[in-house]
Image (spheres, rainbow, N blue to C red):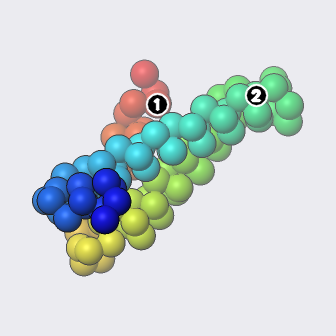
Amino acid sequence: MSLIEAVRERLPVKYREMAKFLVVGGISYVVDVGLFSLMSHTVLENKVVTAKAISILLATIVSYVLNREWSFSRRGANHATRRCCSSWSTAWRCSSI
């Protein structure tokens, strides 16, 4: 039995979900910053607000899909929908700072 499998067996589900949620948040951050940097230095060089809006939108979609399909796949769709709204509003608030 590998170390990862041993930890997975002993760790409660809510902590596994939390770890997955943190990983998805990191991936979404990389998508947001990466797309914004790419677009603001190439295609949308003079329109940084538009570039940021597009990067936020795409990062939010990535976050929603990964959280629904991977982080919280054990829960029902109703809970995932509520989580999406919460994640979207949090992402929007944090990125507008």
Disc 2 secondary structure class: helix
Label 2: few (<14), some (14–19) or many (≥20) C-alpha neighbours in 10 Å? some
Residue 7 location, quadrant? bottom left
- Residue at image mark 1: 95
Q: Name the spot of residue 18 as percent of width and height, x first.
A: 25, 50
Q: Of 70 and 49, which appears nearest the observer? A: 70
Horizontal side of 71 relative to 61 (left or right) equals left
Which quarter of the figure is the N terminus placed in?
bottom left
- Residue at image mark 2: 40
Question: Mark 2: which amino acid?
Answer: Ser
Question: Mark 1: which amino acid?
Answer: Ser
Q: Name the spot of residue 9 as percent of width and height, x first.
A: 20, 64
- Up the image or down, 43 lies above or below 20; here it is above
- Up the image or down, 73 lies above or below 4; here it is below
Furthest residue toward bottom? 76
Tell me what residue is drawn at x 49 percent, y 50 percent: 60
Which quarter of the figure is the C terminus placed in?
top left
Q: Of 16 and 1, which appears nearest the observer? A: 1
- Up the image or down, 82 lies above or below 54; here it is below
